[in-house]
Image: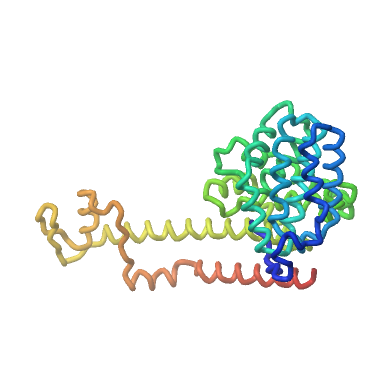
Amino acid sequence: MHHFEICTGNNASQDVSQRNELKNLPSLVELLTTEDSSVRLDSLKKILIEINSVQIDLCHAEQFSKLLDGLEPLLADIQSKEAGLAVDIIELLWIKRVFSTVENERIKFFAIFKEKQLGKIMKEAYLNESTPQQVRESLSFSIFEWDIIENVSDPCFKPILDNIQIKLKEEEEHLLYHPNDVNQDSKWSKYGLTTLEVLFSAFSVYISNSDKLDEEVLKRDGINISLRYLKHPSIWICYSASRIFRLALHRTLDFIYEEKEIRMQKRLEAEESDLEAECEQCGQMIPFGRFLLHMKSHNAMENMHYEISEEYKQDDKVNDNSSKPIQKCLFENLEVDLLYIITQC
């Protein structure tokens, strides 16, 4: 995932059986297998209270493994009250763990989650048209934040990303006219989060996972959105924005360098010279300046890149508008600003 490492988690006991946190969780999970639906519902409600009240940084990922197993069968009937509570628990777990400060336990937890069948079941439920809208919306955030999208062709990816973009735009418009209203009554406020923080986290969660996933975020006005929030007072929003913006910078500079390389190759190929070189393919003596172009006619340059002479490199330093110093300056300024914001939080 893409959040800051603040604590390694070495202060927590490594023996799960000796943990005082979540001491009631094992017995509550066992009740999820009972045939009495009222008992299952009561157990799910108590599990929500138990997890919400615990200090997650003192827990170990392994403590939640059996809970995840117990939630899987409850999602079979996605319209049931039990399924709705199970989805709420899955949502609460990623909120607690994603915004946790313990890096190693966060990584373990996501690894455990991916070993389960929950991800597949959640995506099937999201795509099921009979799924209640409120449950479907909760699933959309959980699918993204649990990092279970496989690739850009995943049928859940684009619909969820589109929906997040729409909600992000709506939230921006709301805050534009009501700047002091950060949706204290929203479902996220009870977790100490703003709607904008959750939306931004989800919008940027797949940045740098693959070029195709990155492209979809950038196509949805990702660059302009990130620019608006680079100096936001929220550390999570600021960090998410910086990841999108940094990607955009790299894309732009890569394009500049590629164009420069093509330009230099054309200059080398067209250059006239008195020197000649013998072509091993056909035995002809070819002027050196045209040798590369001649070799291309033999398809001999297909996967080859050639060096730019020191003279041309010197020209680039004069005429290239100093793209590398610009990149370095932009990154340094961005990182200084981010560091300042973090220290003020």
| Residue 165 visible in the current orientation | no
Residue 183 left/right relative to 127: right
Residue 289 location, x and y as percent? 22, 62
Say which of 12 and 5 sits in front.
Answer: 12
Toward the viewer: 37 or 104?
Answer: 37
Q: Is residue 22 left or right of residue 255?
A: right
Task: Name the residue: 71% across, 63% down.
Answer: 15
Q: Quadrant of the N terminus?
A: bottom right
Residue 313 point in image, percent of width and height:
38, 70
Residue beneath the point at 48% across and 56% down: 255
* Apparent side of residue 264 relative to residue 333 in the rendered image (left or right): left
Q: Residue furthest top?
A: 130
State the image quarter where residue 150 is shown: top right
Residue nearest the observer in this picture, 262 or 59: 59
Residue 83 location (% of width, % of height): 77, 35
Task: Quarter of the image for the C terminus: give it.
Answer: bottom right
**Any part of residue 157 in sight:** yes
Question: 211 or 287, which lies in front?
Answer: 211
Count all numbered tags in the image, as a single digit.
0
Which x, y percent locates residue 285? 11, 59
Q: Please state if 341 lies on the left or on the right of 287 as rendered.
A: right
Image position of 330 with respect to 167: above or below: below
Q: Residue at x 86, y 55 (%)?
A: 53
Question: Is 247 rendered above or below residue 139?
Answer: below
Coloured how? Answer: rainbow
